[in-house]
Image: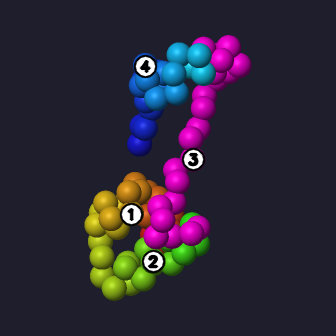
Amino acid sequence: MNNMVPLSKVEAVIGSEAYQKLLERFPGGHIYIKKVIDDIFPDKQSRNKAILNDYYAGASRAELAAKYCLSVPSIDKITGKR
């Protein structure tokens, strides 16, 4: 899954000055922005427990991926399905 964002969009969000500082500090590097767990789940463990509950209740991997904004491979890791 490719979640790459064009730099022009980053600049639009953070402003030109911060954008230039970012480019100077990390030239040619990769920057990972961690996905924020939403307000419903305080941490990954509680989110994963909810995913497992839905999975054992019969939800498909694709349904879970859509509901929890994750990829199917991520759902597979959580459910132990490979």
Q: CA distance from mark 3 to mark 2?
A: 20 Å
Cα–Cα span, label 3 and label 4:
20 Å
Q: Are marks 2 and 4 in contact (CB under 8 Å)?
A: no
Secondary structure, mark 4, is helix
Q: Quadrant of residue 28?
A: top right
- 3D distance between C-alphas at marks 1 and 3: 15 Å
Circles 2 and 1: CB distance less than 8 Å?
yes
Could you tell me if the residues under marks 3 and 4 are in contact, i.e. CB atoms within 8 Å? no
Quarter of the image where one finds residue 50 = bottom left
Q: Which mark is residue 50?
A: 2
Picture residue at 68% right of the left edge, 21% below the top: 26
Instruction: Give the residue type that dot 4 points to.
Output: Ser
Rendered location of residue 24, percent (x, y): 68, 14
Of label 4 and label 1, which has the lower sequence position? 4
Foreground: disc 3 or disc 4 = 4
Residue 72 appears in the rendering: no
Which of pointers 2 and 1 lies earlier in the amino acid sequence?
2
Does 28 lie within the magenta span? yes
Which quadrant of the structure image shows residue 46? Answer: bottom right
Amino acid type at image mark 2: Ala
Q: Which mark is residue 78?
A: none
Look at label 3 and name its amino acid.
Answer: Lys
